[in-house]
C-alpha cells in the first residue's frame, strides 16, 4: 500500500447541506489551488435529494470533484426518519473513508451528518477538524450535536474569541484551538460579473435588479413540540403589510431537520396566495450572497442572518428561540414569535436611519464573526498541521 510519506496529505471535506458547503467552499478552493494537499469531497444528505434541490450539482458546477456520494436521507421528517438517516450516513461514510483513506476529515457546525462523519472518523483513527464549534443554539437539538463533535475532534476553528474559550472549557487542547473567524462572513465578489449575476438571479427567482425584496429563511425549531409552526405563522402574518407596500419576498425552503415537512407545507401554501412571493429550494452560495447584498432586509431564524448578512450590512430580524444564545452584531434584532413585534422590528431594520448607521461602520465592527482572510487561514492550518 502507498505510504503516506510518498504522497500529499489527503484532506476530506464532508458536506451535507447547501449551508455548510457555502461556508466551506472558499477553504476547499484554497486547498485545491495550493497544490500542497489533495482535496477530497464527500457529499451526503440533502445534497443528493431532489426535494432539497440536488445541490451536489452546485458543488460540481463550482469545479469540485465529488469523490464519494453517500445517499443517506430517508423520506419523512419524524425523529425515527432522521435517526435512520443518521445511521445510513454512518454506514455510507464508513465505506467512503475505507476507499478514500483520508489523513484528515473536515466537518462544519452541528448537523447530524457532521456528527456521523466525526464518529466514523474516530473509529478509523482519522483526526477531525471542526469549524464553527463552541457556539450555542438553544432552540435546536443541533446544539448538543455541535458539542459532541467538539469532543470527537482534534482541531478546532472557532468563529469568535468567546467560542475559543468555550471549546477549551469542553476539554480541547488550547494549542489545537484557533480563532479563525467565519469563512461565510467574508464577502466574495472577485471576478463576478454583477450584470450576469443579476440576470441569473432574476431567472432563478423572478426578482429583477432594482426590485425591493425581503429575504426569508425559516427552519424547524427542533426542541419545540410544534417545531416552530406558531413562530412561523406569526412571521407570515407580519409580512403581509410589507407585501402590500410593494416588497417582494424571497423564501428559501427549510433544511431536513425533524419537522421540516410542516414548515415547508406552510410556506408553500402561503406563497401560493401571493404572486409577490418567490420560493426556491436552494439559491446556491453565489446567489445567496447576491440576495444579501441587494435585499432590503432578512427575516426568519437562519444562522445566515447572524453570520453572513452583517458583512453585507443587511439588517435582519431573528425570530423566536432557534438561535437563542448565539452571538450577533448590531445588524440583528431579536423578536419573539409575535406578528406585531416582528413587523415593528422589520420596519426598524429597514429604516433610513438604520441603513445610514450601518453604512458608516466597518464590517469588522458590525460582524463579530468576521476576521480578515479567514478561509485562507483555515486552509493553511489544515495543510500544515
Image (cartoon, helix red, strand yellow):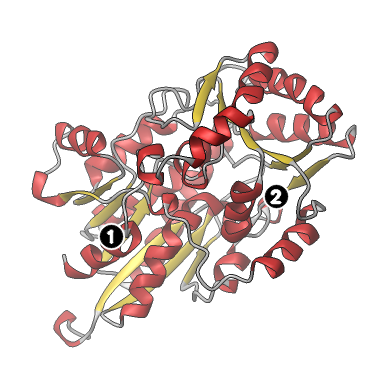
Residue 99 appearing in the image: no
Quadrant of the image containing the C terminus: bottom left
Q: Secondary structure at mark 1?
A: helix
User: Residue 143 lies in what quarter of the image?
Assistant: top left
* Residue under the image location 70 percent in, 67 percent down: 195
Task: Between label 2 and label 1, give the one nearer the viewer.
Answer: 1
Q: Taking 341 as reference, is 21 above or below it?
A: below
What residue is shown with label 2? 281
Q: Nearer the viewer, residue 77 or 356?
A: 356
Marker count (numbered): 2
Under circle 2, the secondary element is loop
Q: Which tag, 2 or 1, sits closer to the chain's start?
A: 2
Q: Quadrant of the N terminus?
A: bottom left
Contact, CB < 8 Å: mark 2 with mark 1?
A: no
**Residue 257 appears at what percent x and percent y?**
56, 36
Check the image and report above or below for 332 versus 60.
above
The answer to whether any part of residue 373 appears in the image is yes
Q: Which mark is residue 272?
A: none
Left or right of 80, for residue 276: right
Left or right? Give the position of 165 relative to 321.
left
Residue drawn at x 36%, y 39% is 365
User: Crowdedness of circle 1 by 10 Å Cα count: few (<14), some, many (20+)?
Assistant: many
Q: Which mark is residue 378?
A: 1
- Image side of residue 100 versus residue 59, left or right: left
Q: CA distance from mark 2 to mark 1?
A: 29 Å
Residue 167 % position (x, y): 21, 37
**Residue 307 location, x and y as percent?**
44, 41
Q: Nearer the viewer, residue 347 or 76?
A: 347
Q: Is residue 194 above or below residue 84?
A: below
Q: Residue at x 50, y 37 (%)?
A: 358
Density class for disc 2 (Cα within 10 Å; few <14, some 14-19, many ≥20) is some
Could you tell me residue 115's position as x and y percent?
Answer: 37, 45
Amino acid at each position: 500500500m502507498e505510504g503516506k510519506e510518498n504522497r500529499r496529505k489527503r484532506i476530506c471535506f464532508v458536506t451535507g447541506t447547501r449551508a455548510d458547503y457555502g461556508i466551506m467552499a472558499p477553504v476547499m478552493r484554497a486547498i485545491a489551488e495550493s497544490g500542497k494537499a489533495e482535496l477530497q469531497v464527500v457529499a451526503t444528505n440533502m445534497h443528493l435529494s431532489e426535494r432539497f434541490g440536488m445541490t451536489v450539482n452546485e458543488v460540481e458546477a463550482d469545479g469540485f470533484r465529488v469523490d464519494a456520494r453517500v445517499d443517506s436521507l430517508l423520506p419523512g421528517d419524524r425523529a425515527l426518519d432522521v435517526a435512520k438517516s443518521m445511521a445510513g450516513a454512518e454506514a455510507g461514510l464508513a465505506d467512503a473513508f475505507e476507499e478514500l483513506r483520508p489523513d484528515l476529515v473536515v466537518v462544519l457546525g452541528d448537523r447530524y451528518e457532521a456528527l456521523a462523519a466525526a464518529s466514523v472518523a474516530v473509529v478509523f483513527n482519522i483526526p477531525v477538524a471542526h469549524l464553527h464549534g463552541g457556539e450555542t443554539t438553544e432552540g435546536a437539538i443541533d446544539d448538543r450535536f455541535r458539542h459532541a463533535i467538539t469532543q470527537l475532534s482534534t482541531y478546532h476553528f472557532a468563529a469568535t474569541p468567546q467560542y475559543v474559550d468555550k471549546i477549551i472549557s469542553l476539554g480541547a487542547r488550547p494549542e489545537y484551538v484557533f480563532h479563525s473567524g467565519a469563512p461565510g462572513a467574508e464577502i466574495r465578489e472577485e471576478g463576478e460579473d454583477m450584470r450576469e449575476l443579476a440576470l441569473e438571479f432574476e431567472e432563478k427567482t423572478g426578482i429583477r435588479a432594482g426590485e425591493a425584496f425581503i429575504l426569508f429563511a425559516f427552519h424547524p425549531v427542533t426542541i419545540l413540540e410544534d417545531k416552530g409552526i406558531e413562530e412561523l405563522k406569526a412571521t407570515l402574518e407580519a409580512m403581509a403589510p410589507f407585501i402590500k407596500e410593494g416588497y417582494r419576498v424571497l423564501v428559501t425552503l427549510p433544511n431536513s431537520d425533524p419537522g421540516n415537512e410542516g414548515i415547508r407545507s406552510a410556506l408553500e401554501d402561503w406563497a401560493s396566495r401571493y404572486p409577490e412571493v418567490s420560493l426556491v429550494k436552494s439559491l446556491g452560495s453565489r446567489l445567496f450572497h447576491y440576495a444579501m447584498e441587494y435585499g432590503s432586509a432578512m427575516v426568519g431564524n437562519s444562522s445566515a442572518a447572524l453570520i453572513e448578512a452583517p458583512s453585507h450590512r443587511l439588517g435582519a430580524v431573528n425570530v423566536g428561540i432557534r438561535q437563542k444564545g448565539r452571538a450577533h452584531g448590531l445588524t440583528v434584532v431579536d423578536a419573539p414569535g409575535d406578528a406585531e413585534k416582528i413587523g415593528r422590528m422589520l420596519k426598524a431594520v429597514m429604516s433610513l436611519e438604520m441603513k445610514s448607521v450601518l453604512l458608516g461602520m466597518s464590517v469588522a465592527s458590525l460582524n463579530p464573526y468576521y476576521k480578515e482572510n479567514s478561509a485562507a487561514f483555515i486552509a493553511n492550518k489544515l495543510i500544515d498541521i
